Amino acid sequence: MLTFANQLTLLRMLLIPVFAILLVYGQVGWALTVFVVASATDLLDGYVARRSGPTTLGAWLDPVADKLLLLTMFVVLTFPLPHLTHRIPLWLTVVVASRDVGIVLTVSIVNLALGPRTFYPSIWGKLATATFAATGVVTLFYNWLATPSAVPGLFAIASGVITVVSALHYLLTAQRPGTQPS
């Protein structure tokens, strides 16, 4: 059950508090490094799982690990930490968190009301995850440089747009589920 892909997912989960602690205590370069490594495990565990065969545990753990990592990044980079040159806007953190809570609630309600269903990730959800990770990397990078720039703000706007698009797509597909009983 603890395949190599699942071990990578667990590693990502273990890196989340390390990332948060490093960032809160002003170790921005190390926080950036840990965030990049944690994000890379997402790509690697997906690749490994496709080659060796996905597991039920991995199908549940992977999206949880993704959401926890990205939500932690959004929340901590929203804090008014004195050593941060760039922060994630509060509105973006609220929109992203609301989308994720909405998805979890929708999946839970559908599973309770209609029985177990499998919700496959959409291209918009995958693009949102990639955009969120890129926003984190860029924001952390410019904080590490301690250089004012408009670039992190542009990534924040892109994250806001993809959040709304992916949420709307998810709502439309949840109404006419292309889901399969599991």
Image (cartoon, rainbow, N blue to C red):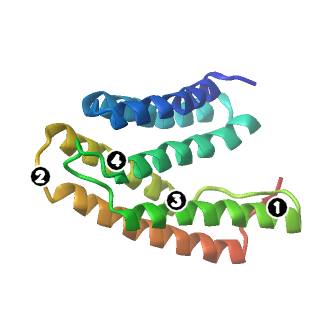
Q: Secondary structure at mark 3?
A: helix
Q: Secondary structure at mark 1?
A: helix
As drawn, 62 above or below 51 = below
Q: Quadrant of the N terminus?
A: top right
Question: Closer to the observer: label 2 or label 1?
Answer: 2
Callouts 1 and 3 close, C-beta under 8 Å: no
Question: Closer to the observer: label 3 or label 2?
Answer: 2
Q: CA distance from mark 2 to mark 1?
A: 46 Å
Question: Closer to the observer: label 4 or label 1?
Answer: 4
Amino acid type, residue under disc 1 in the picture: Asn
Q: Decide which of tag 2 and tag 4 comes sooner along the chain.
A: 4
Identified at 21% across, 43% down, the residue is 143
Identified at 46% across, 52% down, the residue is 129
Amino acid type, residue under disc 4 in the picture: Gly
Question: Closer to the observer: label 2 or label 4?
Answer: 2
Q: Which residue is mark 1?
A: 111
Amino acid type, residue under disc 3 in the picture: Gly
Q: Decide which of tag 3 and tag 2 comes sooner along the chain.
A: 3
Q: Is residue 17 left or right of residue 79?
A: right
Q: Decide which of tag 4 and tag 3 comes sooner along the chain.
A: 3
Q: Which residue is mark 4?
A: 136
Question: Closer to the observer: label 1 or label 3?
Answer: 1
As drawn, 105 above or below 46 = below
Q: CA distance from mark 1 to mark 3?
A: 20 Å
Residue 148 image label: 2
Identified at 60% across, 36% down, the residue is 50
Q: CA distance from mark 4 to mark 1?
A: 32 Å
**Mark 2 Cα shell of 10 Å, populated few (<14), some (14-19), many (≥20):** few
Q: Which residue is mark 3?
A: 125
Q: Decide which of tag 2 and tag 1 comes sooner along the chain.
A: 1
**Mark 3 Cα shell of 10 Å, populated few (<14), some (14-19), many (≥20):** some
